[in-house]
Amino acid sequence: MDCLGWAAKDRSGVLSPYKFKRRPVGSDDISIKITHCGVCHADVVWTRNLLGNSNYPVVPGHEIAGIVKEVGSNVQRFKVGDPVGVGTYINSCRDCEYCNDGWEVHCEKGTLFTFNAIDADGTVTKGGYSSSIVVHERYCFKIPSDYPLASAAPLLCAGVTVYTPMVLHNMNQPGKSLGVIGLGGLGHMAVKFGKAFGLNVTVLSTSISKKEEALNLLGADKFVVSSDHRQMRSLSRSLDFIIDTASGNHPFDPYLSLLRPAGVYALVGFPSEIRFSPGSLNLGMRTFTGSVTGGTKIIQEMIDFCAAQKIYPQIEVIPIQYATEALERLVKRDVKYRFVIDIENSL
Ligand SMILES: [Zn+2]
Ligand SMILES: [Zn+2]
């Protein structure tokens, strides 16, 4: 038992200490001493068995940052002492067209998720609420030495989840207009990327309470309360792209009407159902699309972009002992804007 983690033992989702063994370091693997792990909505989903497929005990966490402590004999890109990150998946076939293109997250044979997935040897993968992890080097990312590890953690899921659809749909061209639905871990990063790309950024929120911070702290250009019909009408057909980070259910037609003709609506949250009028797409020849995290190529590009542009997530650093409460607060959307667990100093 070489690894100490915190795990949920049943669907109550309450986390407590749990010892287990990490696999030996293979020739292509690196072993990482975890220093920080971000707290993502996915951690709530699987610690509480919300999809009915949790494999208890669940050690959550897929926004992992740390330091390389051991490398296998074939490892090329890393050496002991390097700062590194691991995101939402830790293996794929490395042989299909998607893997060969750096889109491993869409691997034909299926991607191995960082926690709660069944590994090739039959064991359940265990995430970053733990002292260490062993990962094939392909699924690890270099973190520039001047970028704080606590800030790097949320980039590995929240950051890349919004960065990927923005770049794929050419929303890194200055002057375009972006709408961001939801201002949590994902949404606040979309605002930061939008401003770094030179976009005109409008935050669309159900509550006025985040207005001040959206405009002054995150740098959004406009803040619109989505229940205010007059404000919404004034935005009609004005946005090139909307990124929807809301995890709860909401109507889609009012937001789709804000897109210009040929505008794109990208869904990165997981509502239980999507319903909208066909006219909301047809009449403006709009596109409705979805996205999850990103391939290894774009994850490294995004980390390097954040370091070069000095983009940092807004984080609240917490000890591991606070993890259960943090998940509870995340459900209530009571976090500005991402919890990061200080594994190094509290586990
Ligand atoms: Zn996540
Ligand atoms: Zn593949």
Image: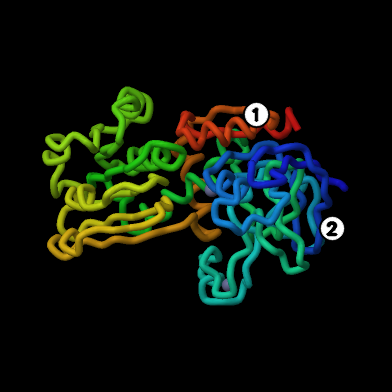
Give the side of residue 250 with respect to residue 15, left or right: left
Tell me whether the residue at label 1 lies in contact with that at label 2, contact meaning CB atoms closer than 8 angstroms.
no
On screen, residue 207 versus residue 302, left or right, reads: left
Write the residue at 33% across / 58% down.
274
C-alpha separation, residue under disc 1 versus residue under disc 2: 30 Å
Check disc 1 and report the residue beneath it.
322
SS label for mark 1: helix
The quarter of the picture where the C terminus appears is top right
Q: Nearer the viewer, residue 133 or 18?
A: 18
The answer to whether residue 32 shows anywhere in this view is yes
Q: Which residue is mark 2?
A: 24
Give coordinates of residue 184: x percent, y percent.
Answer: 43, 37
* Residue at (69, 63) in percent of width and height: 118
Q: Quadrant of residue 341?
A: top right
Instruction: Characterize the local packing of mark 2: few (<14), some (14-19) or many (20 or more) Cα atoms within 10 angstroms.
Output: few
68 lies above or below 188: below
The mark nearer the N terminus, 1 or 2, is 2
Which residue does the image show at 34% across and 29% down from the upper left? Answer: 214
Q: Amino acid at mark 2?
A: Pro
**Figure check: 125 above or below 178:** below
Callout 1 crowding tier (Cα within 10 Å): few <14, some 14–19, many ≥20: few
Q: Please provide percent x and percent y for residue 53.
A: 61, 59
Residue kind at label 1, given as amino acid type: Tyr
The answer to whether one can see residue 142 in this image is no
